Amino acid sequence: MANISSNVVWHEATVQRAQREAQNGHKSGILWFTGLSGAGKSTLAHAVEQRLHAQGVRTYVLDGDNVRHGLCGDLGFSEADRRENIRRIGEMAKLFVDAGIVVLTAFISPFRVDRDRVRSWMAPGDFLEIHCRCTVEICEQRDVKGLYKKARAGGVKDFTGISSPYEEPLAPELAVDTGTLELEQCVSLVLALLRARGMLPQNVEPVR
């Protein structure tokens, strides 16, 4: 974890999270999509965001590849760098929650300790871990980015599921079988979770 300067003091905002949530008409929180490369994390996160945005919910997707173009552009894929990547994402997601936004994060985030650390920073109910459950075999069949093929050939080091471990969530708020279910079915399951947790405004209708 990065060192904290001794010369900084946390400044309490004049406008509080509860006021932002009241203005938005819904609660904020983190939807943490985790799973293997090719499991459908980004696809599902963006599909859920599209449905929520259409209903007036304030959202933002933090996507693994996009974040590595900027905020985490200095990091590689060693275990240490992956852990730092998730730490930064967790800190940023926490700020989004304070801003009253539903933030959807789509990262492999392979290590339980890192996901659990982000959860520990949040109030109960603010961190919803969503496991995009898909076998390595199916992910490899999809191989959207050609990474599995490169990893099998030794061209990608520390590749999750091949040469680096993926630690599945032990008790996620939701496990979605993205390897077998249609996208709309997966979206329906996520929205049902949000509805059950009271995170959505009353006008958000179930997926039919």
Image (cartoon, grey):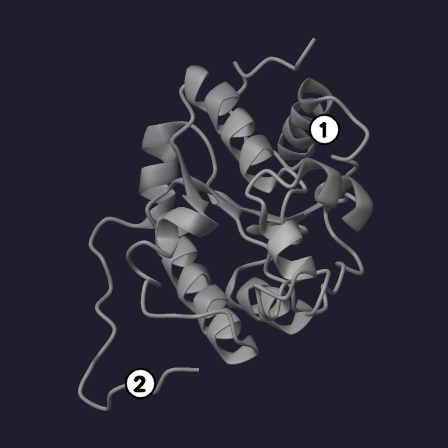
Tell me residue 137's x, y (percent): 81, 45
Rendering coords of residue 23 (x, y %) = 32, 31
Query: Does 86 sit left or right of 172 as displayed?
Result: left
| Residue 14, quarter of the rendered image | bottom left
Check disc 1: other Cα within 10 Å, few if <14, some if 14-19, many if 20+.
some
On the image, numbered disc 1 is attached to which residue?
A: 189
Residue 124 vs 8, above or below: the answer is above
- Taking the spot 68% from the left edge, 68% from the top edge, the residue there is 112
Q: Callout 2, which amino acid?
A: Ile
Looking at the image, which residue is at 58% across and 70% down? 157
Characterize the local packing of mark 2: few (<14), some (14-19) or many (20 or more) Cα atoms within 10 angstroms.
Answer: few
Q: Dot 2 corresponds to which residue?
A: 4
Q: Position of residue 117 (x, y in %)?
A: 57, 71
Q: Kindly tell me whether residue 63 is visible in this rendering.
A: yes
Left or right of 202: which side holds 130? right
- Dot 2 falls on a residue whose secondary structure is loop
Quadrant location of the C terminus in the rendered image: top right
Work out whether residue 125 can be spotted: no
Q: Nearer the viewer, residue 83 or 122?
A: 83
Looking at the image, residue 126 lies above or below residue 50: below
Relative to 172, 10 lies left or right: left
Q: Nearer the viewer, residue 188 or 77?
A: 77
Residue 203, x across and y down, in percent: 52, 14
